[in-house]
Amino acid sequence: MKIVVLPGDGIGPETMAVAVDVLQTVAHRFELPVELDHDVTGHTSLKRHGATVTPSLLQKVRAADGLMLGPTATYDFKDESKGEINPSKFFRKELDLYANIRPARTYAGLQNKFGSFDLVIVRENTEGFYADRNIASGGSEMLITPDVVVSLRRITRLCCERIARSAFVLAMERGKHVSIVHKANVLRVADGMFIDICRAVASEFPEVRVDDFLVDAMMAHVVRAPERFDVVVTTNMFGDILSDLTAELSGSLGLGGSLNAGDNHAMGQAQHGSAPDIAGQDIANPFSLILSAGQLLAWHGQRTSQTRFVEAANAIEKAVAEAIVAGECTRDVGGALGTAATGRAIVQRLALPISMGKS
């Protein structure tokens, strides 16, 4: 498996260094043929190449099996004519990474006010309210007058069908329960179509229980009783907001892994941003990127029928859970370690079976 590694901006290089150590450790332990190809994006690429993402980098990523993208300074990149391209948007769009899979779960040893839960947000990733993903050229936000802005939202049958199918396939591997989140009481045509398509796909999965919630009500439900949910499928912006909420309910946004997957490519990516205010201080939580790396391995293993990759992904998640119980983590999740020390603790847990013989 060839993985292109792009550290990104802010805390990206620190957290990616840890994620790389983890990938190399599980590759050794599970005898995985993993090759890491390091490159740059974001501000480093802009200074070096005049663009945050170059055509040659895209070509390299297309030829690889997967991509690990560190947090980038998205807000800084405003003018694509000057090479200021949003790397996350760019790869999602160019590689057609339509399914954003964002698990959220609670961990033993981490104080939680909302009860134990284990759910996954399945978010459509290529259209919706996002202005940079709706039309072939330019953006879909328009300044009509100095005082009036119109924003367009695109919802298509194709995108609804494939994100719905992604959710139901995942549900069959989990608790066989899918919740559809929408705003069909106001967005009657678009979200009405989204619900109809989700339920049509549901007919192919008779074992899966299906319900649906208005997005505003859903925010209250996941705070009140997150344990009632298993797989949640929704459109782009609703999923973006909801997944941040559920990650924080689990204990920290730093615990939110994220996989952007399409039919032929996938990208592991931390759910949080580049946090420039704490960059270089060795305090950033690396777990989001570590868990995302695990998701990328699992995706590759499932699509190529190589169970060792899935086993490696499970080992990563188990090591993170054990580290939290032991307090071997950063301050935001109850520990006292820095970023690098947290990474070393995870690596030690993952490498331990090596000295005891093959597992």
Image (tube, rainbow, N blue to C red):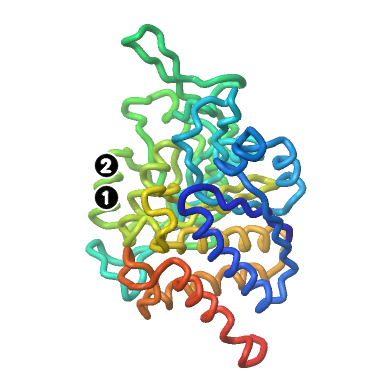
Up the image or down, 45 lies above or below 297; here it is above
The relative height of residue 156 versus residue 8 in the rendered view (above or below) is above
Q: Is residue 107 left or right of residue 344?
A: left
Instruction: Return the residue nearer the eye: 291 or 314.
Output: 291
Q: Position of residue 33 (x, y in %)?
A: 75, 68
Looking at this view, name the residue that lies furthest to the front: 47
Kindly identify the amino acid type of the residue bearing the numbered disc 1: His
Identify the residue at horizontal 47%, vertical 69% (top origin): 340
Q: Locate residue 121, reporting x and y percent.
A: 44, 50
Front-lying residue, 83 or 311: 83
Q: Which mark is residue 221?
A: 1
Position of 192 compared to 344: left or right? left
Whether residue 199 is visible to the viewer of this picture, yes or no, is: no
**Residue drawn 74% across and 51% down?**
64
Q: Viewed as shown, does residue 31 lie left or right of 80?
A: right
Q: Position of residue 312 (x, y in %)?
A: 61, 72
SS at badge 1: helix
Residue matched to label 2: 217
Q: Which amino acid, by three-letter code, is at mark 2?
A: Ala
